[in-house]
Amino acid sequence: MKLLVFIARLIVGVTFVFSGFVKLVDPIGSQYKFEEYFGADVLNLEFLIPYALPFSILLILAEIMLGVMLLLGYLPKLTVWSLLLIMLVFLFLTWYSAYYNKVTDCGCFGDAVKLSAWGTFYKNVFLIVVVLILVFGFKYIKPLFSGNIVKWGTFILFFTFLYITYYVLVHLPIIDFRPYAVGKNLPEGMEYIGEIEPPIHDFYLESVEGEELTNIVLTNDKVLLVLASNLDKSDLEGFNKLKPITDNAIAKGYTVYALTSSMVEDFQKIKVNYKLNFDMLFADETMLKTIVRANPGIVILNKGTVTGKWNWTDADKVQIE
């Protein structure tokens, strides 16, 4: 039983720490996933959508801390029962998503690892069984270190994770698992290999006149894009900070566009108010949210390769060469 509990402790602890960490570096991605679950066509809890970000942060911190506490052996009884409770919630959500085909990707491992809906459900069934071993054998879970080291180590890690969450919300994810990460080539990510859907399958840009400009943008060696997925939710101060950047880019021969899913009239108001000297292109809101976790944010492309990404809060760090 001791060996069984030890193995179960490692499996669950490492899984929860990994799952929590890949979401910790990108909590906004989890926010979008909560918004999807709360939507009218899934759980029909739309009144919770404004609280999606706090929910995501709480879940991420709970997940990674439970993994840490299990591995360190801190408060084992509380830890294993909390793990069982959270796994039962996960099990129901993933079964509901798979059975009714509501959410095809639960986001359990962020953008780092993609699982099918049923694959995620069976993964949770396996973890429930392993957690039950811990529940019945929690007395065999001993602290990894003696004295107060485990307790203070737990608290230090908690505040470290809290700081990481704050940092990535103000800036951008410290690790980017998406196909739009710096160094990625978008045309390559759009290529089909056999019948497998490519990681980038919805990158489409259209002018206000209805002309497709996707290829033009992806083949130009000097492109700066200001991404604002939804102008109604944009931080308007960002456009004021980005204007010197876009002016400098245009002066150096860059093609500059704003990408948004909002109406032309909404962009024209911002263009006039902030004296912006570039036009907009229509793009899918989900795609824009995937490309950069900022509203607005900046992306620089060189023949389709992402050479730089910044949150508007880091406008002073943008380098135009």
Image: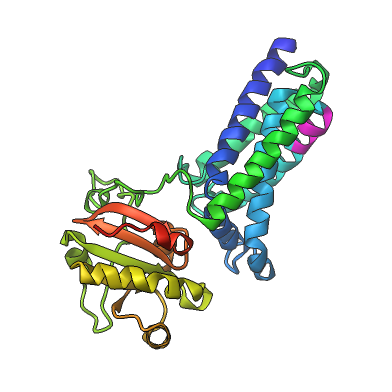
Observer-nearest of 4 and 97:
4
| Residue 44 in sight here | no
Observer-nearest of 208 and 314:
314
Residue 162: x, y in percent?
66, 46
- Horizontal side of 289 relative to 86 (left or right) equals left
- Horizontal side of 231 relative to 130 (left or right) equals left
The dominant secondary structure in magenta is: helix
Q: Quadrant of the C terminus?
A: bottom left
> Hey, which quadrant is residue 309 in on the image?
bottom left
- Which residue is pictured at 47% across the width and 58% down the height? 293
- Which residue is pictured at 68% across the width and 24% down the height? 71
- Which residue is pictured at 76% across the width and 23% down the height? 149
Above/below status of 237 relative to 195:
below
Q: Is residue 252 magenta?
A: no
| Residue 5 in sight here | yes
> Hey, which quadrant is residue 120 in on the image?
top right
Above/below status of 135 relative to 209:
above
Residue 213: x, y in percent?
21, 71
Labels in figure, total: 0
Q: Is residue 81 magenta?
A: yes
Q: Quadrant of the N terminus?
A: top right
- Horizontal side of 171 relative to 210 (left or right) equals right
Q: What is the magenta range?
A: 77-82
Observer-nearest of 279 and 163:
163
- Which residue is pictured at 20% across the width and 60% down the height? 218
Residue 313: x, y in percent?
48, 62
Colour option used: rainbow
Above/below status of 136 relative to 162:
above
Residue 188: x, y in percent?
22, 48
